[in-house]
Image (tube, rainbow, N blue to C red):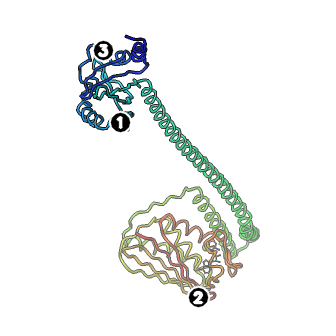
Amino acid sequence: MNSENKQFEALFDYATIGIIVTDKTGIIINFNKKAEQDFGYHKEELIGKAVEILLPSTHTAKHANYRSGYYQHPSPRAMGAGRDLFGKRKDGSVFPVEVSLSNYTADGDLFVIAFIIDITVRKDIEIAKQQQQEELSKITFEVKRLNASLEKKVEDRTKMLREALSALEQSKEELSEALQAEKSLNELKSRFVSMASHEFKTPLSTILSSAFLLEKYNNMPEPEKREKHIERIKNAVYDMKDILGDFLSLDKLDEGLIQSNIHLMPAADCIQLIETTVSEMEVTLKKGQQINFNHVGNAEARIDRLLMKNIIINLLSNAIKFSAENSFINITVRLAKDGLTLIVQDFGIGISEEDRQHLFKRFFRAKNAFNIQGTGLGLHIITRYLELMHGTIRLESELDKGSVFTIFIPN
Ligand SMILES: Nc1ncnc2c1ncn2[C@@H]1O[C@H](COP(=O)(O)OP(=O)(O)OP(=O)(O)O)[C@@H](O)[C@H]1O
Ligand SMILES: [Mg+2]
């Protein structure tokens, strides 16, 4: 072997890439050391074998086709553009490769040289890079998700905070409303005290003067005079009792102490209750006043006996008080399936439209009632009693003609 040949052999054997030489039928005729290392064969094991021995079995059939194609138009080029190439070691394991092809002709025969680089490390790096990228995009996604959930949380907390604030505001309002109610109740009570002391003045001075006179008439033989003053004292006491009664029932209503005891009452009992109450009131009629009592229907009524009685007393005492001597008062009761209707009509002083707006407020008294005794509580108490029985009250009136109060209590 001359030195040039030796040099070429060294070049072939110590090249840092694998080199395989095949003949035109794909039979291996040479194999360098690097290729031996990469594929795990000894050169002698491969010389004379088809090159496909170095390919994974899934690639061998196609490779034979590519090979004959290449031999028809041989040129130096990279192999396997656009696809991954693999080599198969002696132990059957597979590894990624990069292959470029070249050829030469000797003695009229075509030979092909394949330069093979094991790219396992590069592929591993590529895979690691891709994995890292995937990992990164997962993390980015997670960060975005966390961010969104954080934003949502912040939004929720803000909303909660806002709600808490508005609840606070609400309870503040409620507190100040309660305070206001307490204040106005106190105002009402002190107003009542001054009103009551005013109202009490007249009956008290009547009682006082009558008592003096009684003392004076004590030894006189005129029993009618004594009786007259005893009667005046009694009436004055009744008046005071009425005023106190009104206030006490209002107080009880305010404190929720009055509870209704509603039950179904047969028509006959209901009519009897109203009739008795009316006849009890007859003693308070003015001279010549007359009550007409009518009733229609015979359905049961769903009422509270005591509340009903008080409503009638209040309405009737107004009708008597606010109408003149010799006038009529009409009372009608209608007992229908859907409920009880009670109508109290008088032909007295009536109520102006303006005053009608405020009539059911506590202590309200119409202008034309100025000279007539009263505290302005009766109608208010009626509305409170009706609330307890789920009833309603309606009023029609004309000044100096009279008034009609209609109450309805549903069954
Ligand atoms: N039948 C009526 N005719 C004319 N005015 C009436 C009649 N009923 C009520 N009013 C007017 O409505 C006001 C309020 O009536 P309400 O019964 O509440 O009070 P009052 O009769 O003045 O006092 P109290 O009933 O507390 O003794 C009366 O002061 C009066 O001005
Ligand atoms: Mg009254």
Q: Nearest the camera: 347 or 287?
A: 347
Closer to the eye: label 3 or 1: 3
In contact (CB < 8 Å): disc 1 and disc 2:
no
Report whether 111 appears left or right of 122: left
In the drawing, what numbered circle is on residue 83? 1
What x and y, as percent, mark residue 376? 65, 71
Residue 215 appearing in the image: no
Residue 282 appearing in the image: yes
Q: How packed is label 3: few (under 14 Cα within 10 Å), some, or many (20 or more)?
A: some
Work out whether 357 lies above or below 173: below
What is the spatial separation of the Cα atoms under label 1 and label 2, in whole angstroms?
124 Å
In the drawing, what numbered circle is on residue 43? 3
Three-letter amino acid code at the position of disc 1:
Arg
What x and y, as percent, mark residue 143? 53, 38
Closer to the eye: label 1 or 2: 1
Quadrant containing ligand 1 reads: bottom right
What is the spatial separation of the Cα atoms under label 3 and label 1, in whole angstroms?
28 Å
Residue drawn at 40 percent across, 12 percent down: 6
> Hey, which quadrant is residue 301 in on the image?
bottom left
Three-letter amino acid code at the position of disc 3:
Lys
In contact (CB < 8 Å): disc 3 and disc 1:
no
Work out whether 317 lies above or below 113: below
Say which label, 3 or 1, has the lower sequence index: 3
Disc 3: residue Cβ within 8 A of ligand 1's nearest atom: no
Q: Nearest the camera: 86 or 267?
A: 86
Report whether 104 appears left or right of 252: left
Residue under label 2:
326
Report whether 339 appears left or right of 383: left
